[in-house]
Amino acid sequence: MITLDTTRADSIGPEAKEIDTLAFNALAARGRRFRQAYATVPQTLASHASMLTGLYPAGHGVHENGRYLSDRVPLLSERLHTAGYRTAAFVSAFALARRFGLARGFDVYDDQTPPRLAERRSAETTDRVLTYLSRPSSQPLFLWVHYYDPHYPYEPPEPFRTRFAKKPYLGEIAAMDEQMGRLVAAFEQRIAGPKAIVIVGDHGEGLGEHGEAQHGNLLYQATMHVPLLLLGPGIAPGTTDAPVSIRRVFHTMLDWASLDAAKSLRGSDQEVVVGEAMKPFLDFGWLPQVMAIEGRFKTIAAGQI
């Protein structure tokens, strides 16, 4: 499972403009791309909690960064660990530090960041993952890798800093894409047996649309519409246009592990996709917001909800 922080759906993939994400595009040609995938919350911790529990925030209790997931809420990693999987996570930002409750069930939870920094580059995270993958084991593996590069501040490394001098956000996407290609190549080479890959964004980025420079406060497409790609057994290559929630990554992983097929993205279940933005209310006393998407219709409500 590769999670892409702060990655807009229109910034990556074959339909992206002004950028060629070669690694993602090559994988998309082999897998199924969900063109209408949505975050549960436009923030890192809450959306990841949804992917790792299969629940909306009302179910798992984490509505924004800095909150704590209750140990009474079961995690995907715990289910897979109990089923005999090695479990390892490599996260690239303080927002997902073990103190917030997502480390349960992981044999390895690498959340180290450089001194006085809240994040680490995708290149360093990939280096750490490749070192881990070099250790032989006959156990099945659940591996979660989180990349944080596209999050503000936008400071891509060279050559992407120069190539995207006028649009550094895209430079961060390009740098991350390069490392994702490196990661997947090593994973497919070093892990024997059937393999499945999920690549998913946790939320997008406003980039000034609707007056929001970054994310967390609004529920428009810029911050809620994210990439989602599946490769693995039972997944026919192509695209799907039905709206889906990223919380169903949890169910899809359990399905691949033959533990529970309900709500898996390998099925054709239609759903009403729900999202929320509680940060404006919790932090500033502003109106909370919710969204609902069904088919081609989307509504956003704010106020007494």
Image (cartoon, rainbow, N blue to C red):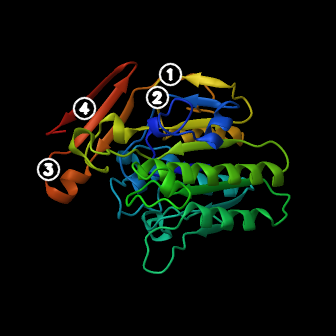
User: What x and y, as percent, mark residue 69?
Assistant: 42, 60
Placement of 68 over or under 199, stated as above or below: below
Identity of the residue drawn at 39% across and 42% down: 40
Q: Which mark is residue 241?
A: 1
The one nearer the camera, 290 or 34, is 34
Question: Mark 2 and 3 residues: CB-CB less than 8 Å, in contact?
Answer: no
**Could you tell which of marks 4 and 1 lies nearer the N-terminus?**
1
Real-space Cα separation, disc 2 to disc 1, in angstroms: 6 Å
**Could you tell which of marks 2 and 4 lies nearer the N-terminus?**
2
Between circles 3 and 1, the one closer to the viewer is: 1
User: What x and y, as percent, mark residue 6?
Assistant: 43, 50
Q: How many marks?
A: 4
Q: Rate crowding at label 2 as few (under 14), some (14 to 19) or many (20 or more) other CA atoms within 10 Å.
A: many
Q: Which mark is residue 286?
A: 3
Q: Secondary structure at mark 1?
A: loop
- Which residue is label 2 attached to? 36
Real-space Cα separation, disc 4 to disc 1, in angstroms: 20 Å
**Could you tell which of marks 3 and 1 lies nearer the N-terminus?**
1
Real-space Cα separation, disc 2 to disc 3, in angstroms: 28 Å
Q: Amino acid at mark 1?
A: Asp
